[in-house]
Amino acid sequence: MSSTWHHAPVTTALIYGEFAAREAAGESPAYENLAVAVSRDARLIGLLDTLPPAKRQPNLLFAAGRFLGAPVTDPPAFLEFAAANWERIAHEIRHRATQTNEPARCALLLPLLAALPQPLALLEVGASAGLNLFPDRYGYRYGDHVLGSGDPVLDCALTGIDPPRELPEVVWRAGLDLNPLDVTDPADAAWLQALIWPEQDDRRERQRAAARTVASDPPLLVRGDLVDDLPALAAGAPAGATLVVFHTSVLYQVPDDRRRAFTDLVRTMRAHWIAVENPTVLDHAGLPHPPDERLHNVLALDGRPLAWARPHGEALTWFGDRP
Ligand SMILES: C[S@@+](CC[C@H](N)C(=O)[O-])C[C@H]1O[C@@H](n2cnc3c(N)ncnc32)[C@H](O)[C@@H]1O
């Protein structure tokens, strides 16, 4: 049976318009203005359309621009810069990915990590530069409860449970990523910084502090896929430690069938599994209403949803069993 209804094609201009209205509005005036300007600029839209569809996304264009020194707070000047430097921008876009590494997500993991049998062997899939493999080295402030003395200090508004009393003891840490980044490599470090939105200086400073901590003791980071290469990496974890496979804000980048293959695999492993993911990519039955209208991810242990988590680790609202 044929239908006379057709979906309007999702054009690149539309993607930039939607990004301005839904993602940047209220978060980044600079990117909101820039995305609107790009959506209306036929020349840049035409250039973006020469890239593969997955490479046309606003975050990638804007980070590539920032990486190359484009004036992202001045839309007309940005459009000129992009046209004049398109080959360089396209090169960065083709060779790089959106893989923001946010160490503050450790504050979301900590209540669970601290409650598991110690010591821990941590295996992070989608680790980016591995900043979240060091939850034992940072400082934490859950309201007025302070824990640890490391740098950076991660602030998290925690409700529904008591804050953790002890840092976990980590005896092994390893990360898996399609494209691991090295915080000791100046270009990788600059790319990580460029991925953070212009107004978010506190996030840039936090990332720099975490990168210093990580650079003094770099983790094992392996290039590979979270399904195909997970068992081999997990086999290297020491016996006698609790193996924890975890991931934060990764599965939205993984196609449906591979996501299912990953969750099927991780459930068969002799490991605990911690996920902090958007509820649209990792389905959980019977979730309560989120605390407010803003975007919240779900913190889950071994497939059981436990808490709503703000995307950059700034708040954790517990609703499930206590750890
Ligand atoms: C948005 S970043 C999040 C990084 C880190 N988990 C964090 O929360 O700071 C997602 C990461 O997942 C990685 N990734 C995406 N698909 C993957 C796959 N199939 N296997 C391994 N890593 C993958 C990307 O390369 C990227 O570094």
Image (spheres, helix red, strand yellow):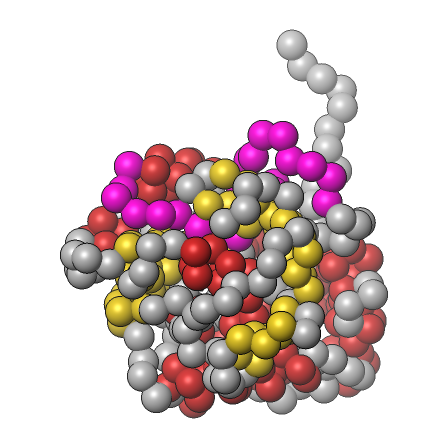
Q: Is residue 264 above or below residue 150?
A: above
Relative to 255, 170 lies left or right: left
Quarter of the image with the N terminus is top right
Looking at the rendered structure, the number of numbered marks drawn on it comes to 0
Q: Is residue 169 above or below residue 286?
A: below
Which residue shows up at 69% across the image and 37% down it? 288
Looking at the rendering, which quadrant does residue 21 occupy? bottom right
Whether residue 295 is visible, yes or no, is yes
Relative to 294, 174 lies left or right: left
Instruction: Identify which residue, 94 or 298, lies in the foreground.
Output: 298
Residue 179 at x, y = what percent? Answer: 37, 66
Looking at the rendering, which quadrant does residue 224 occupy? bottom left
Which residue shows up at 39% across the image and 82% down it? 214
Which residue shows up at 59% across the image and 41% down it? 320
Instruction: Identify which residue, 47 or 53, lies in the foreground.
Output: 53
Residue at the outermost top position: 1
Residue 27 at x, y = what percent? Answer: 77, 68
Whether residue 188 is visible, yes or no, is no
Instruction: Identify which residue, 36 or 306, lies in the foreground.
Output: 306
Within the magenta stretch, is there residue 34? Answer: no
**Prevailing secondary structure class for the magenta stretch in the rendered image:** loop
Within the magenta stretch, is there residue 272? Answer: yes
Q: Is residue 312 above or below residue 84?
A: above
Q: Is residue 137 above or below residue 43?
A: below
Which residue shows up at 82% across the image and 63% down it? 25
Residue 234 at x, y = what percent? Answer: 23, 54
Q: Which residues are magenta?
A: 268-290
Residue 4 at x, y = what percent? Answer: 76, 20
